[in-house]
Image: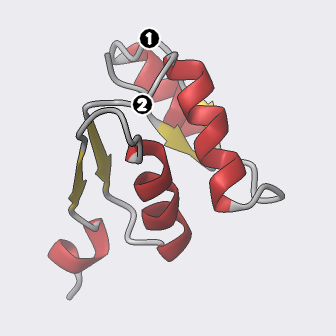
């Protein structure tokens, strides 16, 4: 299962068309832990792998909190789009 999160409703709509089961709109009013809790709630638990591609510090922090679970190991893949495609 994949669960894309984004600040853009348009990108989330594209993710749904591409087969995402669920999406989460990022709420800028929430701190990173609260946003992570929202994502974990939608997932029904912590994921095995979290992928962060935006390069935003707050998104990386959220990804760390989403994957953090003392009872199981998890991986975080950090591949910021800006890093690879910056001119």
Give the number of the disc on residue 21.
1
The reply to whether discs 2 and 1 touch (Cβ–Cβ < 8 Å) is no
Q: Residue at x 16, y 74 (%)?
A: 84
Rendered position, 63 above or below 37: below
- The percent position of residue 1, horizontal first and vertical second, equals 31, 16
Give the number of the disc on residue 67.
none
User: In front of the other: label 2 or label 1?
Assistant: 2
Q: Residue at x 43, y 65 (%)?
A: 60
Give the residue at the far left of this rendering: 84
Residue in the foreground of this view, choosing between 84 and 76: 76
Q: Which residue is mark 2?
A: 46
Q: Residue at x 38, y 71 (%)?
A: 55
Rendered position, 22 above or below 66: above
Lateral position of residue 56 relative to residue 53, left or right = right
Give the residue at the far right of this rendering: 29
Quadrant location of the C terminus in the rendered image: bottom left
Rendered position, 40 above or below 17: below
Residue in the foreground of this view, choosing between 26 and 9: 26
SS class, disc 2: loop
- The percent position of residue 70, horizontal first and vertical second, equals 38, 42
Lateral position of residue 66 relative to residue 74, left or right = right
């Amino acid at each position: 299962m994949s669960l894309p999160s984004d600040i853009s409703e348009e990108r989330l709509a594209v993710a749904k068309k591409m087969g995402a089961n669920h999406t989460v709109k990022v709420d800028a009013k929430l701190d990173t832990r609260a946003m992570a809790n929202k994502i974990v709630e939608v997932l029904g638990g912590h994921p095995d792998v979290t992928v962060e591609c935006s390069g935003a510090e707050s998104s990386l922090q959220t990804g760390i909190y989403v994957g953090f679970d003392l009872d199981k190991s998890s991986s975080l893949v950090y591949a910021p789009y800006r890093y690879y495609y910056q001119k």
